[in-house]
Image (spheres, grey):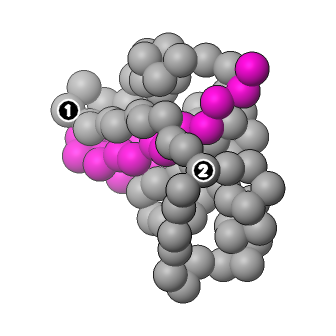
Amino acid sequence: MLKTYLISYDLIGGEPRVAYQKLRQAITSVAFWAKPLESVYIIKSDLSAIEIAQRLQKSMHPVDKLLVVEVGKDWGSLNLSNEVVNWLRSNL
């Protein structure tokens, strides 16, 4: 069964553009996803939060920070794109 997770990160080490591209590729290859904010993804996956974190860690610098949290159906937003809001409505 697919669960919904929020992924947030701070890319501290390494070259920022390269680090972002590597992490984005890792996140978007894991699951169905939306990107509502600059350093936030919401994904659907059959993996656990710790499994997702472990997979993403391979694409991150050792000092980068990562948070993966399962989310539920109660949500609110301001000024997000229609595409992201529609994804949230359909997937949360």
Name the residue at the front extreme.
74
Quadrant in which residue 85 is drawn? bottom right
**Mark closer to the observer (1, 2):** 2
N-terminal label among 1 and 2: 1
In space, the residues marked 1 and 2 are separated at their CA atoms by 32 Å
Q: Which mark is residue 10?
A: none
Residue 45 visible here = yes
> Element under label 1?
loop
Q: Amino acid at mark 1?
A: Val
Where is 69 relative to 46, above or below? below
Q: Is residue 84 magenta?
A: no
Q: Is residue 6 left or right of residue 16?
A: right
Residue picked out by circle 2: 73
> Element under label 2?
loop
Q: Residue at x 59, y 58 (%)?
A: 35
Q: Residue at x 51, y 42 (%)?
A: 71
Q: Is residue 79 left or right of residue 28?
A: left
Residue 46's spot in the image, x, y percent? 68, 20
* Range drawn in magenta: 1-23
Residue 55's spot in the image, x, y percent? 51, 18
* Quadrant location of the N terminus in the rendered image: top right
Q: Nearer the viewer, residue 84 or 63?
A: 84
Where is 38 relative to 92, above or below? below
Residue picked out by circle 1: 63
Q: Residue at x 61, y 17 (%)?
A: 47
Q: Nearer the viewer, residue 56 or 43?
A: 43
Residue 69's spot in the image, x, y percent? 42, 36
